[in-house]
Amino acid sequence: MGKKISDNIGKAFNIESMAAARNRAFAFQAQKEGRKDLARLFRAIADAKSAQARRFLGHMKGKIGSTKENLSEALENEKRALEDIYPGMAKEAEGAPWAVKKAFNQTMKVSSRHLDLFRRVTETGDSEVEATLYVCRICGYISENEVPDNCPVCHAVKGRFAEVA
Ligand SMILES: [Zn+2]
């Protein structure tokens, strides 16, 4: 496969991934506005975009390995984001509006939590995460087995957590 095609596969993966995230956010907003029908449509589009992204990812050489390999890659990605990417971005956001600064700082805290979870399953050789997992829909913090009264990172109330099926 030529370089142009490989590059396009990577671009298509990025486009579909971003569209999935965007449509999921639009669904969240529609839900808040009480437009359940449109929220469902946005969620369906988001799921479809995720499927398309997954398809292109499958054509990116070496991008989907065994679960053991994927865990290791996921861990390295979190580590890189946490150590090499976000600290610089957070520093550059110091003069930005408060909410933007907060988004970068909380993303670092949440990524650190994600890294801990990946480290635990990778280092202990545990292939199973037995805990029930709840995700804060505001900041992305993951809680195990119980929903905290307030999110330890963004202080969102209990109702903002969603159980992961
Ligand atoms: Zn939160």
Image (cartoon, helix red, strand yellow):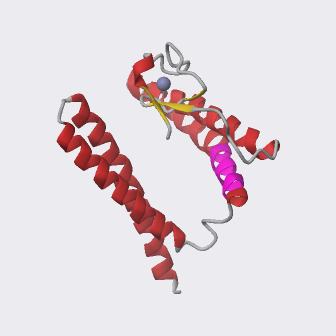
79 inside magenta stretch: yes
In the displayed orientation, state which residue is furthest to the bottom: 1
**Position of residue 16 measured from the top left corner of the image (x, y, whole percent):** 38, 60
How many numbered marks have been drawn onto this rendered protein structure?
0
- Residue at x 42% of width, y 28% of height: 138
Point 63% across, 39% down: residue: 82
Please, what is the dominant secondary structure of the magenta stretch? helix
Q: Quadrant of residue 81?
A: top right
Residue 1, position as x, y percentages in the image: 53, 86
> In terms of depth relative to the viewer, which is nearer, 95 or 125?
125
Q: Which residue lies furthest to the top in this view?
A: 149
The residue range painted magenta reads 70-80
In the rendered view, would you say 40 is above or below 66? Answer: above
x then y, percent, for residue 73:
67, 55
Q: In this view, does 91 lie above or below 2?
A: above
Q: In this view, does 20 lie above or below 13?
A: above
58 part of magenta stretch? no
Residue 8, quarter of the rendered image:
bottom left
Please give left or right for residue 3 compared with residue 61 in the image.
Answer: left
Q: Which residue is drawn at 50% across and 34% down?
A: 92
Q: State the residue at coordinates (23%, 49%).
A: 41
Residue 27: image x %, image y %? 28, 41
